Image: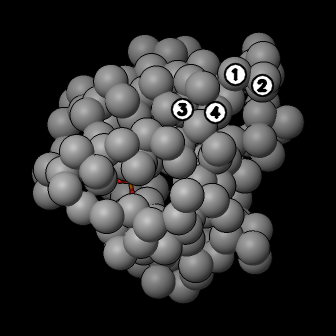
Amino acid sequence: MSIAVYPGSFDPVTLGHFDIIKRAAQIFDHLVIGVLNNSDKKTPLFSLDERVIMLKEAVKDIPNVSVESFDGLLVDFVKSRHSNVIIRGLRALADFDIELQMAQSNRMVAPDVDTLFLSTSLDYAFLSSSIVKEYAKYGVDVKDFVPGNVLPRLKEKLSKMSITTGGN
Ligand code: PNS
């Protein structure tokens, strides 16, 4: 059985991520989405549990996809799931440097784990979780950017933080 791991912060999951998930799930028998817990990045908007729940809701109709969180090194998580393939989406040249560096360093520490890049669909080439949060914060309706289940959670989160989300 071929198993791949699609890791990320998913804060929150976007339609760009979802597009990669659907396509990777067609290539592999099983796709494990790994949601990063230990982030060096700034504090995420959504808690780990919220990010996992939003992903589970979004992929509920894709039978060969599961969602888990992980701590520590990605390659260790990949091996623990009996996989040797990491899936990453490439949007544009701007992604390339960092993605190549990650893929190469992961191979240095785990030579049997490879990274497979899927090119993001043009419709989502501009999209990132940061852009979604930025627009939502300023009241732009982000329904074309995130899976439907994420919208109310985004609105609720931002309104709790007393930030207007606009839209309806
Ligand atoms: O969606 P993101 O935030 O770009 O995903 C980054 C991620 C989760 C793939 C990366 O930060 C990661 O693999 N973190 C786990 C720690 C690790 O293995 N680091 C070494 C590779 S840089």
Name the residue tied to disc 3: 55
Percent position (x, y) of residue 21? 68, 42
Badge 3 marks a residue whose secondary structure is helix
Which residue appears at 54% of the width and 32% of the height? 55
Residue 32 visible within the image:
no
Badge 4 marks a residue whose secondary structure is helix
Out of 124 and 143, give the one closest to the viewer: 143
Residue 60: mark:
1
Q: Mark 1: which amino acid?
A: Lys
Cβ at disc 2 under 8 Å from ligand 1 = no
Contact between marks 1 and 4 (CB within 8 A): the answer is yes
Contact between marks 3 and 4 (CB within 8 A): the answer is yes
Q: Residue furthest right?
A: 26
- Quarter of the image for the N terminus: give it: top right
Residue count near mark 1 (Cα–Cα under 10 Å), binned few <14, some 14–19, many ≥20:
few
* Disc 3 from disc 1: Cα separation: 8 Å
Cβ at disc 3 under 8 Å from ligand 1 = no
Percent position (x, y) of residue 163? 24, 61
Which residue appears at 78% of the width and 17% of the height? 63
The picture quadrant where one finds residue 77 is top left
Q: Mark 2: which amino acid?
A: Ile
* Disc 1 from disc 4: Cα separation: 6 Å
Badge 2 marks a residue whose secondary structure is loop
Badge 1 marks a residue whose secondary structure is loop
**Which dot, 2 or 4, sits closer to the camera?**
4
